[in-house]
Amino acid sequence: MRPATATAAAVTTLIGVGAAAVAAGRYASDAALKAPPGRPLPSDPELTVHATAPGRIALTRCLAALRPGVYGIEGSGIHAVVGEVVDHAQHPADTVVRRLERVTRGSPEPGDRVRMTPQIHRGTPGEALGLDHKDVEIPSELGALPAWLVGGARKTWVIAVHGLGTTREHTLNTMEFLHRQKLPVLSLAYRGDEGAPRSPDGLAHLGDSEWRDLDAAIRYAVRSGAERVILHGWSTGATMALRAATDSALRDRVRGVVLDSPVLDWESTLRALAVANGAPSALLPLAVRAAQGRTGPHGNHLREAADPHALRVPALVFHGPDDTLAPWQPTRELAARRPELVTLHTVQHAPHASMWNANPARYEEALRRFLTPLM
């Protein structure tokens, strides 16, 4: 082969390999950045419904099905709520029997495939909890964001924001408790959610751009009479809360943050999401680079938000070692480096964004103690 021909062939090969690498990287990053909101995260296995009886449901036996607490289960046309494991119930060795608290959609039948989810409610605050609420629209840089506003007598508002794999219905888990404390609660749908404007590039940014929608919610709350706000976020919603508490022009109105399973190491979370959505592990470095190229080098911004020295307000953090999507170690480091501001409640045997589900009473008591001096 002549030198010119060999060089051309080599260049062609390199271009082909490069194009394949780019395509592979985009495929893997899509698995993480295009996950639709409201679909249970694939980090937990699918479970088969083996049997149902009044107040009981038998599921495939695995660590996920044995978790303590209360969870939703979702499948095709199905949403139900399961409680604690029923130890004394007779069942085959390969199944787990849990209390079936209620069925909110469809009817689970033997053979149905379901996943567990932290969302235990469906519908609006009125439909799910019987709470009076207003459907409001929050002006933002991308357009109107739909939100629920549940009124309260206090001038301190809680702004609640969901995260990965859930919708604003996830915030209903704590809304009844907050209402009993007479705190107004504003729960918003942000870019990419149903009814909200689409992100310009159609991708999730793990809180790096979405936090500006939370900033818009703070402005709305202040215009509507809030003198102080507390930001309560789950997952990437917790990341958004940290960004807003640090970078919002109204950060002086933020009196505290409540962080449930915060995403503080975006690369680890992106890799975990890609793997959970079926991307081969060999493509993960390409997925990270592709995500950076498509969404911008947002990792630095997220690291700045998680910088212990940037924290200015009290923070209550719920997290634990069983979270496979948001590493627990960065949370521990944040708490260790700012003990005067950060209260860490470690929750065992709870997956991502499910710290309330593992023990609602313990969660709400910690929340009550944190909120009381901030009201």
Image: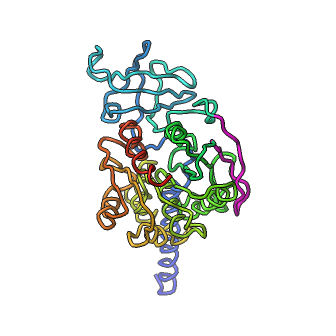
Query: Residue 287, percent across and down?
Result: 46, 62
Q: Is 242 a magenta residue?
A: no
Give the answer, above or below, for where 108 lies relative to 238. above
The quarter holding residue 295 reads bottom right
Give the answer, above or below, for where 31 lies relative to 129. below
* Lateral position of residue 91 relative to residue 18, left or right: left
* Lateral position of residue 108 relative to residue 307, left or right: right
Query: Residue 234, percent across and down?
Result: 47, 50
The residue at the point 70 percent across, 63 percent down is 141
Query: Which residue ends up furthest to the bottom in the rendered image?
Result: 3
Residues 298 and 156: in front is 156
* Lateral position of residue 139 relative to residue 305, left or right: right
The residue at the point 35 percent across, 39 percent down is 362
Q: What secondary structure is the stretch in magenta mostly built from?
A: strand
Query: Residue 345, percent across and down?
Result: 33, 50
The magenta region covers 132-150
Query: Residue 134, percent across and down?
Result: 70, 41
The residue at the point 47 percent across, 81 percent down is 6
